[in-house]
Image (cartoon, grey):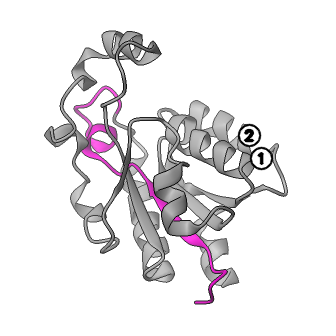
C-alpha cells in the first residue's frame, strides 16, 4: 500500500454493542462484523480498532448520561467493554480508547496523521460512527463510511445516520463492502 492509502478504523466492536443481552446490543452486529473482517484483511497493517470506555468526567453531561444508563457505568476493564472475539485479531496495534462517542482525536491522528484517508465501519452507526465521521471530516480528513459494515441501534436509526453522513460530500462518501473491495 502507498503512504496515502486509507486507514480502516473499526469503531467499537465491543461486547456491550454486540451482546443480545445488552440494552445497547445491535441486532445487525454479526452481519457487520463479517464485513469488517473482510475489510480488515484488505487493509493489512493499516487497521485501527477503537473502544469506547466509560471514563468521562461525571461532573459534565456524562454524569447525567450514566445516570440514564446505569448498566454501562462500569470500569473500563469490565467484560462489557472487551472486544468481541472476532475483533481481537484484526490488528496488532493497541486499541485507541476514548471516553467520547467520536473517536477522532489526538490518539487517532498520532497514527493516521492530521488529514488522512479513513474508511470507517463499526457500531453504532447512529452514535459513534457518525460522531467520528463528522469530526474527522470537519478536521480535513477524507472519510469513506462502509454502510453495510456498520451496525445501527435500529434499522431506522442506521438509515437516518447514513442519510446525514451522505449530506457531506466530498468530505464523506458512502459505499458498501463489495464496492470498496472491488475498487481497489
Label 2: element kind = helix
Q: Mark 1, residues whose alpha carbon is within 10 Å: few (<14), some, or many (≥20)?
A: some
At 42% from the left and 56% from the top, the residue drawn is 31
From the image, which quarter does the C terminus lie in? Answer: bottom right
Checking the image for residue 163, the label placed there is: 2
Q: Are marks 1 and 2 in contact (CB under 8 Å)?
A: yes
The answer to whether residue 173 is visible is no
Query: Residue at label 1?
Result: 166
Q: Position of residue 71 (x, y in %)?
A: 23, 21
Q: Quadrant of the N terminus?
A: bottom right
Q: Quadrant of residue 112?
A: bottom right
| SS assignment at label 1 | loop
Part of the protein shown in magenta = 1-24
Q: Is residue 93 visible?
A: yes
Horizontal side, residue 50 vs residue 163: left or right: left
Is residue 19 inside the magenta stretch?
yes
Horizontally, residue 105 falls left or right of residue 17, namely right
The magenta stretch spans residue 3:
yes
Which of the pair 182/77 is nearer the observer? 77
Q: Position of residue 24 (x, y in %)?
A: 35, 30
Which of 90 and 183 lies nearest the eye of the viewer?
Answer: 90
Magenta-drawn stretch, dominant element (helix, strand or loop): loop
The image quarter containing residue 76 is top left
Amino acid at each position: 500500500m502507498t503512504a496515502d492509502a486509507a486507514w480502516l478504523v473499526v469503531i467499537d466492536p465491543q461486547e456491550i454493542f454486540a451482546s443480545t443481552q445488552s440494552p445497547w446490543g445491535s441486532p445487525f452486529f454479526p452481519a457487520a462484523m463479517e464485513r469488517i473482517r473482510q475489510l480488515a484483511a484488505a487493509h493489512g497493517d493499516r487497521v485501527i480498532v477503537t473502544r469506547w470506555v466509560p471514563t468521562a468526567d461525571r461532573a459534565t453531561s456524562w454524569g447525567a448520561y450514566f445516570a440514564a444508563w446505569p448498566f454501562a457505568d462500569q470500569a473500563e476493564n469490565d467484560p462489557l467493554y472487551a472486544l468481541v472475539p472476532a475483533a481481537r485479531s484484526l490488528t496488532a496495534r493497541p486499541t485507541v480508547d476514548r471516553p467520547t462517542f467520536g473517536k477522532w482525536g489526538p490518539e487517532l491522528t498520532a497514527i493516521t496523521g492530521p488529514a488522512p484517508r479513513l474508511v470507517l465501519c463499526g457500531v453504532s452507526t447512529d452514535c459513534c460512527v457518525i460522531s467520528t465521521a463528522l469530526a474527522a471530516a470537519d478536521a480535513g480528513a477524507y472519510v469513506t463510511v462502509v454502510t453495510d459494515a456498520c451496525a445501527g441501534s435500529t434499522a431506522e436509526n442506521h438509515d437516518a445516520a447514513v442519510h446525514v453522513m451522505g449530506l457531506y460530500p466530498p468530505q464523506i462518501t458512502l459505499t458498501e463492502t463489495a464496492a470498496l473491495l472491488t475498487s481497489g
